Amino acid sequence: MSMSTKKLWAEFIGTYCLLLAGTGAIIVNDISGGTVTHIGIALTFGLVVFAMIAAFGDVSGAHLNPAVTLGLFLAGRIPRRVIAPYIVSQLGGAILASATLMSLFPQHPTLGATVPAGTVHQSLLVEILLTAMLMFVILSVTAGGDTSKYSAGIAIGSTVALAALFAGPISGASMNPARSLAPALVSLRLDVLWIYLVGPVFGSAIAVLLCRCTREAGCCPMPTREV
């Protein structure tokens, strides 16, 4: 098996585990009357992100998120040719995870889909800001390429958990188009999905600009023309 194929499998498996654990925690919390708790859900997302970065960070980079893949391309960290294969692998893993959860919990109406608690514009802005924060942390802790996958995993996983803790009740704190698309698609709850596709992409682009403003020259160069 080629290294490029192994990278795609790593993204597929990592995103599968992210959705299985994260949205699974939401489902179990709902059907058990709140035993997991909001804090438990936030910690589940943060811990599974850390675990997948520890497992696959040295294989594929453990993006687990189309917005992260796009952000890394905009930051000049990855070539254009890997974008589509990575995103397809991430979406495939996420959709399979939601299908798995539907087979386990067919009575759950949303399968952990993200929905706004307030207005659409409020959730859109929250998703942009949260993803910008997450992407900025990712770009910062991986700058220079000498950060261990464990320290990067702790920083990134903690950021995910932090965002879910304070903003989960507002927008669902998705920050990840694959995380939102999969349960929405499998449960056929597509009416507000656009928020969670558009917001993270804009947030990632903003983070790249912030990184260029705060870090040394060459940290986030313009994307290469390689295809």
Image (cartoon, rainbow, N blue to C red):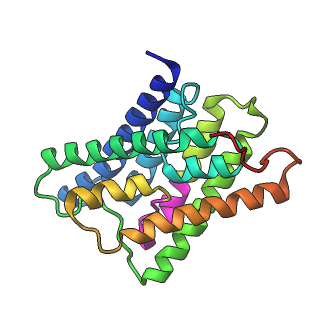
What segment is highlighted magenta in the picture? Answer: 161-174
User: Residue 139 location, x and y as percent?
Assistant: 70, 47
- Depicted 45 relative to depicted 153: above or below: below
In this picture, residue 225 sits left or right of residue 10: right
Answer whether residue 21 is visible to the viewer in this image. no
**Residue drawn at (41%, 65%) of the image:** 172
- Image-quadrant location for residue 148: top right
Of residues 160 and 92, the one nearer the viewer is 92
Q: Quick check: 219 left or right of 127?
A: right
Which residue is at the far top?
Answer: 1
The reply to whether the magenta stretch includes residue 76 is no
x and y percentages locating residue 203 in the rendered image? 60, 64
Q: Which residue reaches farthest left?
A: 107
Q: Is residue 183 left or right of residue 103?
A: right
Snapshot quadrant of residue 119: bottom left
Look at the image and tell me in which quarter the C terminus lies: top right
The residue closer to the viewer here, 186 or 107, is 186
- Majority secondary structure in the magenta region: helix
Q: Residue at x 59, y 66 (%)?
A: 202
- The quadrant of the rendering that contains the N terminus is top left
Residue 82 visible? The answer is yes
Question: Where residue 6 sits: x, y (%)?
Answer: 46, 23
Q: Nearer the viewer, residue 101 or 150?
A: 101
